[in-house]
Amino acid sequence: MRILLVEDEPTLRAQVRTGLQEAGYVIDEADNGRDAQHLGATEPFDAVVLDLGLPVLDGLSVLKRWREAGHTLPVLILTARDSWHEKVAGIDAGADDYLAKPFHMEELLARVRALIRRAQGLASPLLQCGTLALDTRSSRVTLAGQTISLTSHEFRLLAYLMHRPGSVVSRTELTEHMYAQDFDRDSNTIEVFVGRLRRKLPPQAIETVRGMGYRLVAPS
Ligand code: CA
């Protein structure tokens, strides 16, 4: 899952980035509204954390431009403490949720998890596909109740597939959601990670759909 983090204050941005990365997300960053607006309009993010007070172009304008252009990406806005009017303006501009500064990282993570699963039409933070389960709160993966140990790449790959059970996901789509923009992307490496992940899952759990991509199938 790939997240756009927009915050101009370097210390806070670094803290949030670290927290999100530790939770298994891939992060692209912007420190001003113009760059943020461009990134959100051109890259397929799973969620956005958007500060409202930004240089060049304010966060509310960024959000309005995305929504006017029809971009439905889930957006969590960061508002000033006690500023109820910012929350109202933000939600009216198309924000999906808000968080007032200062906040606890745990609350930001919970809100991001909720945004991502709601965008996929998923009700529970525990994602299940047959006997395979991924708890988005703890980043723990189990198969028939037994914990499976995954590398960060394997986890990102499985998390993306688990958010789209039964759907065919192309290698390009997986690449776009597993790597940040500045990363040297090579969709062939996806095959390598799929191979490694398959060895930790039941046979046929990740089905190859010829010429299209991969599909997660409930292990029986
Ligand atoms: Ca700011």
Image (cartoon, rainbow, N blue to C red):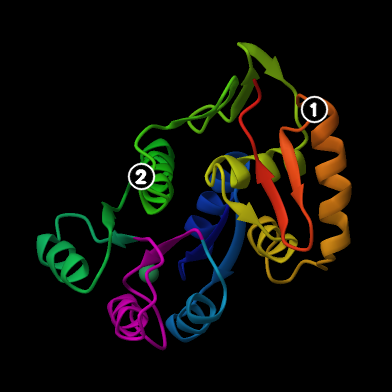
Q: Position of residue 124 (x, y in %)?
A: 38, 32
Whole-number angstrom distance, CA of label 2 to CA of label 1:
34 Å
Residue 136, given in percent of the width and then of the height, sits at 50, 33
Asked if 75 appears above or below 111 in the picture, the reply is below
x, y percent for residue 45: 53, 64
* Range of magenta residues: 46-75
Residue 14: horizontal and vertical position, in percent?
57, 56
Q: Earlier in the sequence, mark 2 or mark 1?
A: 2
For residue 93, side relative to residue 73 (left or right): left
Nearest the camera: 51 or 206?
Answer: 206
Residue 156 visible in the current orientation: no
| SS at circle 1 | loop
- Mark 2 lies on residue: 111
Quarter-of-image position of residue 199: top right
- Ligand 1 is in which quadrant of the figure? bottom left
Residue in front for this viewpoint, 181 or 33: 181
For discs 2 and 1, the disc positioned in front in the rendered view: 1
User: 18 or 204, which lies in front?
Assistant: 204
- For residue 187, what is the image quadrant? bottom right
Type of amino acid under label 1: Pro
**From where the camera sits, is residue 200 visible?**
yes
For label 1, the crowd category at 10 Å Cα-Cα, with few meaning under 14, some 14 to 19 and many 20 or more, is: few
- Which residue has dot 1 on it? 203
Is residue 69 located in the magenta-colored stretch of the structure?
Answer: yes
* Residue at x 25% of width, y 70% of height: 94
Question: Which residue type does callout 2 highlight?
Answer: Arg
What quarter of the picture does the C terminus occupy?
top right
Q: Residue at x 68, y 64 (%)?
A: 180
For the residue labelled by badge 2, is the local secondary structure a helix, a strand or a loop?
helix
In the rendered view, would you say 11 is above or below 202?
below
